[in-house]
Image (spheres, helix red, strand yellow):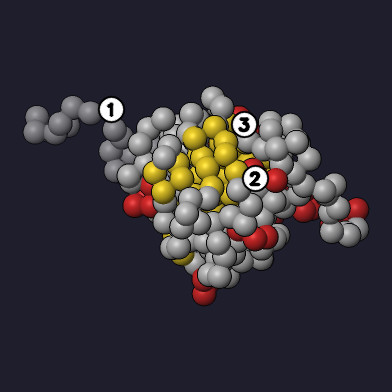
Amino acid sequence: MADSDPVTDRPSAREPRPHDPAGAGSGDGAEGFDAVVGGGRPAPAEGPAPSRGLGVLRETAIIVVSALVLSWLIKTFLVQAFYIPSGSMEDTLEIGDRVMVSRMVPDVFDVHRGDIVVFKDPGGWLPPYEPPERTPVGQAVTNVLTFVGLLPQETGDHLIKRVIGTPGDHVTCCDDQGRVNINGEPIDEEQYIKPGSVPSQDPFDKTVPDGMLFVMGDNRQNSADSRYNTGKPGGGFVPMDNVVGSAFATVWPLGDATFLRNPGDVFAKVPEP
């Protein structure tokens, strides 16, 4: 070996490689290469491929369940849809309208005069509810979709009216011009009561108790509201705890979609009780 040759454990290209399978190290053909790669060991057996269909079903189920849970959370704590079954709020709301209701009223935000609120029947305001005829399966599907918020709540035990008096207010009707007065201040309601209606065809004089609301429909001559339920539980007033939320938009029919704004200017001059 010449002095210039490097010191190495690698065998010379001129010498046979130790432990070379027969002919493998010589580079003679593909058989030799395969023998080195395989190392003489049998190839591992291929197991069954994971089912792609099951993975897709699992991912779909996760997405659907997550969407349903999110919808339920929104309906329970933020926004809920309701169906309008009667004409007591015409022309502001028509039969068949769907409205969106903020569930943050009254727990997070206060109820104000002029708000349109959905509330549970205080007792005896509504006749016994007769749900639409459906098959058992159809009713079960409807119940589930309503529960998670994908269908509007049927207002079988709920009502929707406009708040006229809040706790402590002295609400009377009618003055010499036929107007409702709140704490001695007359209000002009022409912008929301049904055209052709009068503020009230019957006189009343009520002071709203603590924790209660005095409500009226915009279709004053076709609304069984606080004026006509004085002999029922609560004396015609709506307990604040019965309020589900405040309606802020009509979303169906699409052609009539609009925001339901509080007519604050109507009550701007009303003094506090």
Q: Amino acid at mark 2?
A: Arg
Residue 170: x percent and y percent? 49, 35
Across and down, in percent, residue 252 comes to 57, 66
Q: Residue furthest front?
A: 176
Disc on the earlier residue, 2 or 3: 2
Horizontal and vertical percent position of residue 52: 66, 53
Distance from the alpha carbon under mark 1 to that under mark 3: 95 Å
Q: Which residue is mark 3?
A: 239
Residue at mark 1: 9
Q: Which callout, 1 or 3, points at the residue further toward the start of the chain?
A: 1
- Type of the residue with mark 3: Pro
- Image point (48%, 29%), residue name: 168
Q: Helix, strand, or loop for circle 2?
A: helix
Mark 3, Cα crowd under 10 Å, few <14 / some 14-19 / many 20+, is: some
Q: Residue 243 versus residue 144: which sits nearer the camera?
A: 243
In the picture, the quarter occupied by the N terminus is: top left
Q: Which residue is mark 2?
A: 227
Three-letter amino acid code at disc 1? Asp
Identify which residue is drawn at 48% across, 50% down: 175
Q: Nearer the viewer, residue 192 or 19?
A: 192
- Distance of label 2 from label 3 (alpha carbons): 15 Å
Query: Which of the two residues, 170 or 153, is positioned nearer the viewer here?
Result: 170
